[in-house]
Amino acid sequence: MTDSRAKDFHIQVIVGTLIEAAADRDHAVREVVITSLRRIAQKHASVVLKDMVAYRMRNPKLTASHLIALLQAMEQICKERFQDIDDDVVHQLIEFSVEEMTQTADYLPDQQLPTSGILVALGQAHCIEVMEGLLRQFQPGVYPHYTILHTMGALASANVFGIVPFVKATLGTMLPMVGLLRNDAMKQVFSYTLGRFCDAVSEYLANIDHAPDPTVKKEAFSSEINIAYDVLANTWIHIREPKVCETVLQAIGLMFPLLPSEKVTEQVPRLVPVLLGLYRRSVDPYPITQCLSAVLDVALSLNKSTVEPLLDNLQNIMFDLVCTSPDYAQPETAKNHYEVLRCFNCIAGHFLDRVIELLIQQLKNNNDRERIKALFVVTHLVNSSENLIHPRIANLLTALRNMLGEHNVKVKKVLLKAIVAFASHGYLDGTEGKECVEFIVKHCCPHPASVVGKDLNNSSLLEELQGTCANTLYLLATTVPHIENTLWPVLLHCLLASQYTPACSHIARCLVYLATKRKDQLNFTESSAKLIQEVIGPHVILGRCLALLGCPLKSGRGIYILQFLRNYVLNVSRHLKPLWEKKIPELVCHIDRCKDNWDERVWEDHLLQFLSETLTEVDEEKWSVGLGVKLMEQSSLYQSYPEERGMLFKCLAVIVCHTTDTQFISQQLDVILSSMRQNSTNESKACARAVGICARSHLELVLLKLEKMRKEELIRKSSRLLNFMKDVKHEVEVERVRLTLLLCYGEVALQASDTQLLPQLEQGVAQWVLQQMQTAKDASVREASLRTLGNIAEALHPNRNTLHVILQSRNEMLSQTLSQLHPQYSNTGPINRRLELYPIVLHVATALIKLPPSLTAAERVSVLKTCFDRVYTAVALMEEDINPNESPGDINNSVDVGWADHMNLILDCLGSLVQELLLDSVSPATLDDIFTLLEPWLIKKSSQQRAASINTLHSVLQCYLDNVNFSYEAPSKFSQSGLILGRVVPRCTDPGMAVRQEAVICVQLVLCLAALYEGCVADHDNDCANDLSQIRDKFLTEDPNELFRVTNELAKIICARLPHIQLIHFLDSLLDGLLDVEPCSSSGASVVLNILIKSKGGELYHQVNDILCKKILIG
């Protein structure tokens, strides 16, 4: 007992402290205090409340903020713990609250409303005690305090069963005062309380089975409510104060269901016009509509004839009140909108034909707003009164179909909602369903830029409509089962329609779900074919999907189409299910894994392999031919979709490879080749790839077709009269055909069987391609010619050339290829465009060099000289694009990043070519030839040429080091190391930072080569590489002192590792470096020369005269 008292004492101390802390000026502190008191009250509600009341009684002059904080805390505690409060505390709280609430006649909502809330909360469990406390302040003939009536009204909503026994007596006290009230505030609170009482009575009667007194009848309150209604409906409703009028309207709406039927019949013709007239006043329309809805509900259920004379005016006004775009940020506006729709619902229940006629008339209205309103009402009626309007559904659907060609975006959005309403209730089948689904699919497509760009606001609306339609279509497919039989055939039909190609991802997404539910059913397409008046065969669907998979990343279509095919497999062929169950997930995984680093050629190979395996699995020529025929028929679908059209041709080619029907093969080749004149460059490449695939199995026929095209198309005469006028269109078509033919021959060279192709390459194909390259006017034709020559060279490479066919005209082709190393277009064009053929030329030249027999030394030198002259001269073109503030000599510092990347590609290709020439004869003689040709470029004034040449030297030295072999026939000495080092060392202090690094690497490679020829082991090479790697980055400095120091280190490394016999050659070459075009490079050469003479002077004793002579000549 002692412990319990101590605990209670501690709680009282804590509560008292918190109560005093509630006086803090900081609002955040007061919030924390209130929260703490509420948490304590969870176990000690009575103690907390009792202490708070006592504190208030002891301190009658609390500050307003302190008092409000305490009252709000008491209100919250009473709401949360009203069942746990002791009876004596309840009585204390009631007395306290009534006194606190009524101690001043002024309206102080911050203090009085929380106090009223305390009484309402207590009234949920102690209604009698609370009402007794309130009624003591509510005596007959004495105007009550405003908050007394307000609390009674709030309590009536909170405890219906508890308040109804007090209603009749309370009304008896209230009504004598009603007619004498003059104050608007009192009229408002009287109206509020009367309305809450009526609402409580209605709810009591509606739940009479659970009421404490089931004998209560509506008639028990009729006389009091009649009196109150007469005052409110005849007098107070006309009050000008909007807030009072709104409260009166709410009360009338709640009273009306309790009026006797005779009174209702009498009042409807009077009240409805009054209510309609209030819309013209500055009164919130929501209370008016709410009241009108209640009146109509009661009146129409009793006697609809009372409303019929008012119907036309009523409908017109209600229709005007429908919102065209309900604003949910303004709840009252949205509430009024839906209350208006409820009114239409009431009217339609008794005057359906009149309502439908109005709606159909408005759906045809030229005004967009009126059509939107009508659609809102139609949608509401379908959703809420399906059984009621069922007899007129056909009329509404007809009106809806007539609107599917609507142009206004806002109308379309509301029309979409109406379509969804009809669909979800099972009304969209047959023609109506097909047209409505097509409407949704149509608007899943992105709108043309010409339409979107006219109006930015319209643009956002169109995008929103597109997204809404896509989501709506998927929701219909996945959540409305009875529309599946309509959706399935219509979506298949849309999938095959060209105009819906942009929406194919959304269509396929829905078909995935539908096909999942139907995948175990065969011929389910036929069961629904009446809706589209045709049977969609599996070949048609498969062919369309294959073409669309040409661009799997467009709108994410690829994964949906593949998943659909996986579920559709049984309708294509039963034999394919095991294969597709394995292969399709692999394709899906590829898309997911590679979408951020997409390679079209890799995807194309995967997809064509999938088709090839499919055809092999079915292993039925008739089936394959049928698929090919359907693909050919679908080619017209892709006039505006070149990528999909290209994939269709490639799929046709794969099918051709799996058939032996000569007529079919010839037809498919004709289809592929017939599009040559209309092709863009990308389409030409797709066409060529398809022809190349065909050549795998039908080379002879392909070559005949291509030769025929050469003879017919390239010499086809212009249709211009007497050729007096230049036919530009004809010339363009001929060039396109020429380009496509060249690409076709290139693909044939890659794809066809070697044994059939190689004997025919040189005389027929290769010579024609060479001729086209020589006479081409357009760069794209030259590029195609070069690529085809490269493919021919690849076909004749010894790795593929099992017949050992020798390309007799190899040297001529190589010469003609290298002749293309000259800038294209005009000197004013972008540099990367002017040099765009360089990488291709070098690549083709490399491929030709690989062919037997090997080039002679003279031919090798000629090729190298041509390449170095053309490429390094082109490099100089970029000087004008280098920012003067940037470090020279670094190609990557180019202002035009695209040009820098292109130049790097050219240099990489040049490096590959030079390496190939070196690999043909890895010997010091070959290296000497290459370095002799490179040497002049290493000392050019142009920093870019020096950078390019040192880059090439690096690749050559690395290749030599990686591939040199020592044998009894190979040279045992490497006499070039001193000469090369002497030429490279000045570049180590070149103004270009990139040149410096490349030069240091070259020094490292030369020293490693010299060591190898001297018989040193690999560890020696590693030591040398490590020493130079440590100082390489140190050369990237602008500090002259630091550069001098690191150059000294470099000189010491060279002196330590260079063989004795090479010292004089190194010194002799280094002396030439003193005359370098760059002062900093000649300074670097002098530093190294100084170190060399100091450290190795004794070994050069016998060459002193030669050294001095050369120095005198230089000086």
Image: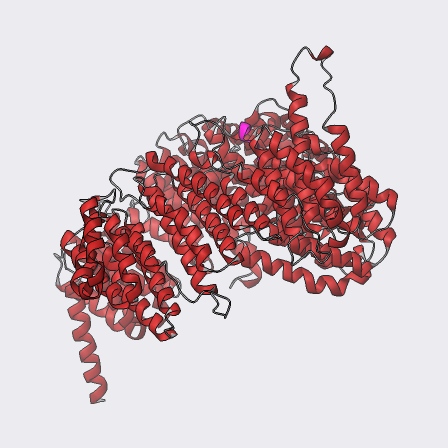
- With 1080 as the anchor, is 140 left or right in this view? right
Q: Which residues are magenta?
A: 447-451
Which of the two residues, 591 or 1096, is positioned nearer the viewer here? 1096
Residue 126: % across, % down: 37, 65
Q: Looking at the picture, tell me which residue is in the foreground, 951 or 619.
A: 951
Is 866 drawn above or below residue 101 in the view shown?
A: above
Q: Residue at x 59, y 48 (%)?
A: 848
Task: Find residue 1043 and report its image quarter.
Answer: bottom left
Residue shown at 52% from the left, 32% from the top = 324
Q: Quadrant of the C terminus?
A: top left
Vertical placement of 1009 versus 459: above or below?
below
Picture coordinates of residue 978 (x, y %)? 31, 59
Query: Could you tell me if residue 1058 is visible in this image?
Result: no
The picture quadrant where one finds residue 19 is bottom left
Vertical position of residue 170 compared to residue 33: above or below: above
Name the image quarter holding the N terminus: bottom left
Q: Residue 434 vs residue 201: left or right?
A: right
Does the stretch in magenta take in 249? no
Query: In the shown orientation, is residue 1016 left or right of residue 416?
Result: left
Of 515 and 138, nearer the camera is: 515
Q: How many marks?
A: 0
Decide which of 1047, 534 is in the foreground and name it.
1047
Asked whether residue 1012 appears in the rendered view, the answer is yes
